[in-house]
Image: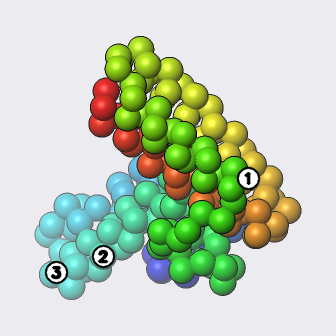
Amino acid sequence: MRRAADIHSAFNIEQETFDVDSKQLDRTFRQLQTRLHPDKLSSSVPEEQENAANQSAYVNGAYRTLKDPLARAYHLLQRRGRSDGQGGEGTIEDPELLMMVMETRQQIEEAESQEDLMALRHTNEAKRRDCIQSMSVAFGKEDLDLAEELVTQLRYLTTAGDAISLKL
């Protein structure tokens, strides 16, 4: 297996799109890992073992990126020259998003019960799903400005979800 400049092609995904078939991605990952796992070559020469280990590590990283919508979006923006792909902590320019982030942080801090936190988690997950769906549309239309805005929103929704999970 050659290293693909585009992680999509490493998984035989023809187009570099935001949408991926999660079940097919999982199947292809298992097939690749079965073939490339370094333990399969334990009786091989060290050079072949090292090559298999490198390929296996690459497949693992590509899989994690494709599996996670935020990482996948960063990757696509980077491939299109629109982002460094690192998800830097830029300032929020959208006043509505800034207000949402501040209100969510306050609600998390003030939550007094598991029920409050579960309600916040449910609301946050719904917003996250909507954001991912909007991101799919934006990437589908190659509206990279909107995709970048949605990546910022998804980053903060993900951070809020993590904060909620820590309090649960």
Element assignment for label 1: helix
Image coordinates for residue 121, horizontal then vertical, percent: 48, 29
Residue 20, given in percent of the width and then of the height, sits at 64, 52
The residue tagged with tag 2: helix, strand or loop? helix
104 or 164, which is in the foreground? Answer: 104
| Identity of the residue furthest to the right in this view | 141
Q: Which residue is mark 2?
A: 54
Task: Give the mark nearer the N terminus: 3 vs 1.
Answer: 3
Q: Are marks 3 and 2 in contact (CB under 8 Å)?
A: no
Of marks 2 and 1, which one's residue comes earlier in the chain? 2
Q: Secondary structure at mark 3?
A: loop
Q: Position of residue 65 (x, y in %)?
A: 48, 61
Is residue 28 at least partly visible in the picture? Answer: no
Total numbered circles: 3
Can residue 145 be seen here? The reply is: yes
Residue 147, numbered circle: none
Is 51 situated above or below 96? below
- The amino acid type found where label 3 is placed reads Val
- Provide the residue designation for mark 1: 136
Q: Residues within 10 Å of mark 1 (few under 14, many from 20)?
A: some
Viewed as shown, does residue 110 lie left or right of 75?
A: left
Please report contact status of discs 3 and 1: CB closer than 8 Å, yes or no. Answer: no
Q: Which residue is mark 3?
A: 45
Residue visible at 31% across and 27% down in the picture: 168
How many residues crowd around disc 3 within 10 Å: few (fewer than 14), some, or many (20 or more)? few
Q: Is residue 135 left or right of residue 109?
A: right
What amino acid is labelled 2 in the image?
Asn
**How far from the left and from the top, in percent, is residue 104?**
51, 39
Q: CA distance from mark 2 to mark 1?
A: 31 Å
Which of discs 3 and 1 lies nearer the camera? The answer is 1
Q: Nearer the viewer, mark 3 or mark 2?
A: 2
